[in-house]
Amino acid sequence: MSEYPLQFATRQIRRAFERAIGRSIPKILTELITNADDSYRHLSQAGIPISDPAPITVLFERSKKRFAVVDRAEGLTDEEMKARFVVYGQESVDRSLGMRTRSLFGKGLRDVLFTQRYGQVKSIKEGKFFNCRFRWKPVEGQERPVVEIKPPSRVTNELREALGIPNNGTFVEFQLGEGVRNPQTDKLVEKLGRFYMLRMINSSPHREVSFTSGEHDEDSQNGTQLSYIFPELEELDRLDEELRTVDGAIIRITGTIGLTQAEQSQGEVGYEDREGGLLVSDEDEAVLDLSLFGFDDDPSARRISGSIKLIGAGDYIRRKLNEAQPEEILTETRDGFDKNHLFYRALKGHIQPRVARIVESLREKRTPPKSALSEHTQEKHKQAFDLLNQLYKEMIGKTGPVPVIPVPLRVPPAPGIAFVNSHISIQSGVLTPVALLLNRALVQQDDDIDCRTDTPDIVVFPSSFRSGEAPKDLNRAQVKILRVRAETPDITGKLTATWKDAKAEISITATRREIITPINGIEFERDKYSIRLGSLRHLRLYVDIQKIPVGSEILLNAEGEAVKLVRARHRVEESNRLTALVAQLEIEVRGEAITENAMVTASVGQYIAGTKVSVSRKEKKEPLAGGIFQGYTFVPMERKLQALFDPQGWILINTRDPVNHRYFGVDPFRSVEEAAHCQVRLADLVLGECLQMMVSEALQSGKLDRKFPNNPEFDVQNYVAEKKFEIGPQIHALFVTKV
């Protein structure tokens, strides 16, 4: 028997490096600045005096796209370089020796230097100069990453002056790789100053991080200082409690939550530009995340800010990384917590209810906008929103949801075609999607696939199709959505798809009420539920009896303490049957504390389903005007956008947007009443924001087909454009009256 070591293609290795840092210059420089800060911390922990504040210098030669980060800390010998740089992904050497460091992945510097051009580390220690280069070298016909460590050499005064290191220290330099844009200096300094991962360092009185652009000379230390001042807060809540992980570890949570005087950008702008949120750090002040734990895109949460310290989280995260089956609690892309990990869910259960109470109080203070429009104009606008609400109902309510097929079920069928389910229940009068799997290694793009039912009372669309161009990944089945409809209930039939000699069949039962046929054994009726504080609510859970027979016990779990399960176990009884093959359970929950999107899960064996539950102080009122869209108003917003859909149903028109201000001026309602061009502008903003919201929701909930699975923004753009063509003339006719 022959054995061969697994080899990785160059592009796969490059992707491994690029996955973490990508093309983000703030992330790249953060890795190097944090390493320098750690080195100063080691000296302090060892009782070795350092300058206060200790300098860290970022040098930037824009004409050459070259960066360097310089410190005057420990320095590195050739043996220390070998121990730290040669093995990728191991625990930090300093951490293994008991030193307190912020390195989590054991990869940071290599992720930087192997993804950029001309990366090297120069260091002076104990009177010697050490040099380490990071480059790609041809090995057996493949490019491979190589760490080249040169023998030590003597140190001259000229070398010290060139590096800016009078004693010990390290000089890390690299040239930006292809595809990484050369940044504007002033904008980069601004980004680095507020970048969430650097806030603890930039705000420390014991560090001086300076940024210098130009050539490396004796004046290079006299650059712009990167600094961050935490905003003043009106403190509303203080935390000091314990989090117990699923494996018994205890994490102490401390911190404060409050309101800033002005609105700040939140989750809508991404990590590099975000201002507000709760800055989460560990016991070593390593920044872990910047989040509002479910309220990141809520307009009512724009002023919420604060800091959370998780004492013991750093050790816990590293321990999970070093287990035989490593778990990454933080995303390797340096974008905070993995939102699906149990640790984050447990943490969210502690913090989200506190944020929810603040958001709820801020929402209650908001009053409906007062309009100076004439009654005639208000009536026209009401008619426009009635049309938009009707379109929302049609888009969301007339077709069944397109099923989301889990990856484990997307196995290419050996015969070439197969339905995901063996049976399905459909509500009469509703066009219901059915998922057919295609093995594209067998089914060619010009092959015909015919679809027929065995009764004229059940129709299928389309009756014939071709699969079209094959996806790149042939190891996963392609999903083709068919649609079936029965106009009357209590009808059964069979749908057959035929490709060459292969046939796939699915049994269909038409019912009076909606019955969900679970794709993967069990499924909640809705993705989201809402409960009034202190009240009970039943969550419907559907069960495929073919996969989970009568008598099976289903385990329930609720994330955090805000949502309480009345019963943690439910047994599938004969009385739960709705049809011969589908059962329905009523899962009773109580709202114990204000929260949003607490996860409730149901599981039995290999099958699992989840839904999100929100708890509010007051019952959700039925939307006015018979729909989700309430109207519009003009508000000044700090965020760089022209309009925004508020979850309370209002379209917020940003009066601080320069274009909006040019149209609407200081009295926007009067401008809308009197000027045709302002009416056109308002119609475009309202129509665009409403369509963006409803199309995004329809795609997410499966009401619209995803034509571009790998580029969802294309789907949104295309559907919005189609709907504008359909409904745009009617909306403009109601808004624009001065033509």
Image (cartoon, rainbow, N blue to C red):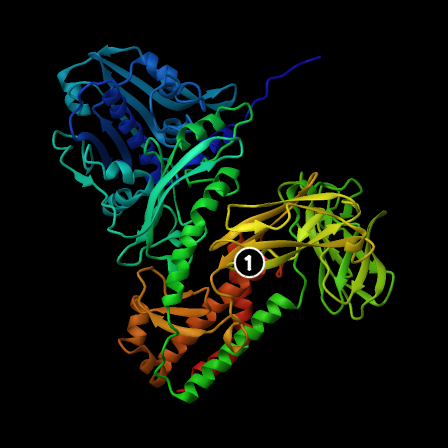
Q: Quick check: 652 above or below 323?
A: below
**Number of numbered callouts drawn:** 1
User: Would you identify the image quadrant in which residue 32 lies?
Assistant: top left
Residue type highlighted by circle 1: Asp
Q: Which residue is mark 1?
A: 715
The x, y position of residue 386, in whole percent, is: 53, 78
Which residue lies at the image location 28% right of the left edge and 42% below the top edge?
A: 192
User: Would you identify the image quadrant in which residue 483 lies?
Assistant: bottom right
Which residue lies at the image location 48% right of the left edge and 46% below the top edge?
A: 349
The x, y position of residue 409, in whole percent, is: 69, 43
* Label 1 environment density (alpha carbons within 10 Å; few <14, some 14–19, many ≥20): many
The x, y position of residue 472, in whole percent, is: 62, 42
Q: Left or right: where does residue 697 sit relative to residue 670? A: right
Which residue lies at the image location 72% right of the left edge and 62% below the top edge?
A: 432
Q: Which quarter shows the N terminus?
A: top right
Q: Left or right: where does residue 1 sit relative to residue 228? A: right
Is residue 176 visible in the rendered image? The answer is no
Q: Quick check: 558 above or below 299?
A: above
Residue positioned most to the right = 454
Name the foreground residue: 139 vs 737.
Answer: 737
